[in-house]
Image (spheres, rainbow, N blue to C red):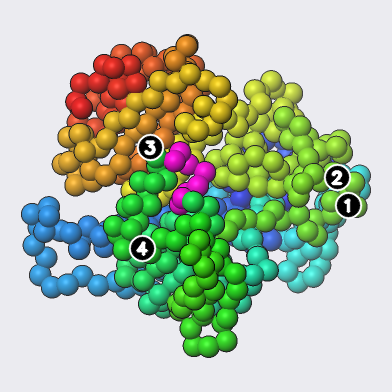
Amino acid sequence: MDFDLIIIGSGPGGYVAAIRASQLGMKVGVVEKAELGGICLNWGCIPTKSLLKSASVFEYIKHAKSYGIDINGDASVDFGAMVSRSREVAAGMSKGVQYLFKKNKVELIQGTGKLTKNKTVEVTAADGTVAELSAGNIIIATGARSKQLPNLPQDGEKVIGYRKAMTLEKQPESMIVVGSGAIGSEFAWFYNAIGTKVTLVEFLPTVVPLEDEDVSKQLGREFKKAGIKVMTSAEVMSVDASGEKVKAMIKTKKGEEEHEADIILSAVGITPNLENIGLEEAGIEVEKGKIKVDDFYRTNVEGVYAIGDIVHGQALAHVASAEGIICVEKMAGENPEPLDYGNIPACTYTTPEVASVGMTEKAAREAGYELKIGKFPFTASGKASAAGHREGFVKLIFDAKYGELLGAHLIGANVTEMVGELVTARKLETTGHEIIKSVHPHPTMSEAIMEAAAAAYGEVIHI
């Protein structure tokens, strides 16, 4: 065998699995056709956060007077510099993975990987040369790409996906964003913040529709307040990109409306990368468009595993990383716990930020729980007032019978940095009263967690 383990794909699932496998004593090879780190580091999580930070700094400058700071002259956006900075940040993170591979003796094989029979991987390099590698085990971690809809065909110029949205040559004057999940909402906020006229179109009744309804409604209000035109219960029926601008026919409850913009950004989800990786040749079972695996990511073919966006579960970078670690630990003969997909945090990095874990209020009621719900608004937070970001709240949902924390839903400044506490609390089966009695530092945004728990039990002090 050339390797104990070959991993196809170096995204947050693949590269994390590779490093953990090496720590466990395996000889590991990773096949990657593009940049190390996959979509997350190069075209997703990391560069988008760089762009959002640039827009956030611009927002602060525009509102500097409210903080007692006088800036002579008007601030302006250098769109090209923002894009360049985001690409530099992404490149730096990719180099960081390269360093980690060297440190952990993980071998990188550059090229396109394809499964063949008998646990071998055929690797085609950029120059067309082909090598065949064998391994005791193989992990498929090929990730996903932007979903293409027939009524929203992407031409890469006027109708684009998220990758192009990060590297446009010039800032568009107007943009229609289709889809208000994390990707769509973040781009809508970014472009609006730097001065692009943005229309956000969502098929469902609220933006970020997977979040708790109270959070979704709050973010929708904040978007409208910021100047984004929000169209919910709306659908793009057709697109005409033949003219100087692109025209979208949008169906609403009131009928069809034509909207015009420089760019349409399609952010309606992702499609798993399952093509041309040899699934049929290797006899690997696919179920409902994703690879079928067990709790430890074993496929129906012995020695072949799959993790990340290509298997059932939330398509999130931190989920792929957790799956990769569990997968290789089981492979190495250890005894890891299966991943609890009900305790996965979700984050949206708009302003205000959105973070959540566990059940929404609606889901908890539908599951038959009797609930105690506590909500603490940031308008009552000293730290939020001092920071100038009083919008949002923390909402905690408890089982009234046993005090179990069923769900946590946050919207406000820096709440993506706060939700980890609640993931840990749920993992440890922490009760509402234990959160109330856990002294939180003052003044902090995180005090709102303690206060929301207290509100659920009628003990809140500051509202």
Left or right of 184 on screen, residue 295: right
Residue type pointed to by label 1: Glu
Secondary structure of residue under mark 1: helix
Amino acid at pointer 3: Leu
Nearest to viewer (mark 3 / mark 4): 4
Quarter of the figure with the N terminus: top right
Cα separation, mark 3 vs mark 4, equals 21 Å
- Which residue is tagged 2? 284
Give the label, 1 or 4, closer to the camera. 4
Badge 2 or badge 3: first in the primary sequence: 2
Using the rendered image of the protein, determine whether residue 211 is visible from the camera's viewpoint.
yes
- Would you place residue 235 above or below residue 37 in this image? below
Amino acid bearing label 4: Ile
Q: Earlier in the sequence, mark 1 or mark 4?
A: 4
Instruction: Give residue 130's quadrant in the image.
Output: bottom right
Pointer 1: what residue? 280
Residue indicated by mark 4: 228
Quadrant of the image occupied by residue 237: bottom right
Answer yes or no: is residue 138 visible. no
Camera-nearest residue between 228 and 252: 252
Do callouts 1 and 4 mark residues in contact (Cβ within 8 Å)? no
How far apart are the alpha carbons under marks 2 and 4? 45 Å
Percent x, y of residue 97 = 55, 49
Instruction: Select label 2 or label 4 by which is in front.
Output: 4
- Amino acid on which the number 2 mark rests in the picture: Ile
Q: Is residue 211 magenta?
A: yes
Q: Which residues are magenta?
A: 206-213
Q: CA distance from mark 2 to mark 1?
A: 6 Å
Nearer-N-terminus badge (3/4): 4
Q: In the image, what residue occupies the spot 70% across and 22% down?
A: 334
Is disc 2 in contact with disc 1, using a CB cutoff of under 8 Å?
A: yes
Q: Is residue 440 above or below residue 258?
A: above
